[in-house]
Image: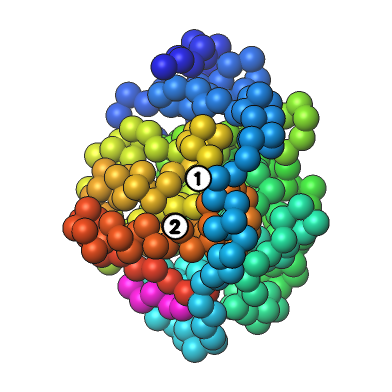
Amino acid sequence: MSKNPTPDQYLLNPSLPVIRENWSGNGFYKGRFLNEFRPGDHSLKKVLKWVTQPNPQKQEKKQDTWTPALHDPKKFLQGNQDGMIWLGHATFFIRLSGVTFMTDPVFFGGPMMKRKTELPVHVKDLPKVDYVLLSHGHYDHCDKKSLKQLRKHSAFELLCPFHLSKVVQKWLPHTKIQEAGWYQQFNLPVAPKVFLLSAFHWHKRGLLDEDTCLWGSFMLQGPSHTLYFGADSGYERHFKEVQKLFPNIDTAILGVGAYSPNFMMRDSHTNPEEAVQAFHDLGARQMVPMHYGTFDLSDEPSSEPVNKLKSLEKSGALKGELRILGLGEPLFF
């Protein structure tokens, strides 16, 4: 297994507290952020292999037209009870201790990324969003059009990893942005507490900007509910590190799609089996899967992630509660 180079500096936000003992900050080497335990391989060679090799599930994928069920979220959105709804991919509207959050807002499709499912609510009909949690800069998580649309009716504050403000500040010129390194707590005036935590992933939006912005996951800790948003991540030891700091996680939102072919995707995303292992590493009470059924980003058939999760649950391999949500379906805390 390859090793990270020795960082030439470690980055922390000096105005924010660090919650992990003896944590020096994010490793930074020649202008690029490093993963915690090992580098990921996102080379062009892998991309070319993926593009040129046949997909053994091609016919199965073509015939699989499954999409998540669509629910009307109006009652939840107009209420005040704590909980969340899934809007597709990695986008969740969350209400915790009366404070509202939106994770990785991506509401629309595009020429290279067609949306397979409807958005369960018009953007203009969303309640006010207090905070947007932006996990990293990839286009399927950091979308200019979606952020600008949301900003039209919500004067949200944006919480994100280091250097991501360089991407989004020009889109949102009057928006307050807080940046953090891993294992730091954001400065919020009211509960819940919000922390940026590690993830095994990467950054790239252009030809020459690979890993110039940091990536991460989030923990929301309210008086009566603790929620982990795993964002994009391959499987690594960081899930166990998170559990040491947060031993009583109620809900873990974990990616279960865009994992095939394995040689291409394993350093970016978890497959259902790996996501279940991550769930066990976290010691969480209930697992909510995401990152499937909205965009076609990989080779597995659309329904495969959910079917695999149900099989793991039925066999007893999943220890805890599995909550597979439809789009717009509320999960109350």
Helix, strand or loop under label 1? loop
Mark 1 near mark 2, Cβ–Cβ under 8 Å? Answer: yes
Q: Position of residue 256 (x, y in %)?
A: 44, 53
Establish if 26 lies above or below 172: above
> Residue drawn 79% across and 48% down?
170
All told, the count of numbered labels is 2
Q: Nearer the viewer, residue 15 or 115?
A: 115
Lateral position of residue 218 relative to residue 107, left or right? left
279 inside magenta stretch: no
How many residues crowd mark 1 within 10 Å: few (<14), some (14–19), many (20+)?
Answer: many
Q: Is residue 193 visible?
A: no
Q: Name the spot of residue 105 as percent of width and height, x first.
A: 62, 60
- Residue 107 figure quarter: bottom right
Near-viewer residue (161 or 53) = 53
Residue type (three-letter) at the residue carrying disc 2: Pro
Where is residue 288 drawn, in percent x and y? 38, 62
Residue type highlighted by circle 1: Tyr
Q: Is residue 329 magenta?
A: yes
Q: Position of residue 44 (x, y in %)?
A: 68, 26
Q: Which residue is mark 1?
A: 259
Q: Is residue 140 left or right of residue 40?
A: right
Q: Is residue 112 left or right of residue 178?
A: right
61 is higher (above) or lower (below) than 47: below
Query: Residue at position x 55%, y 45% from top?
Result: 56
Q: Residue at x 33, y 73 (%)?
A: 333
Residue drawn where x is 54% and y is 70% of the image: 66
**Can residue 40 be seen here?**
yes
Specify start and end residues of the magenta stretch as a single range.
328-333
Circle 2 residue: 305
Q: CA distance from mark 1 to mark 2?
A: 9 Å
Horizontal side of 81 relative to 9 (left or right) equals: left
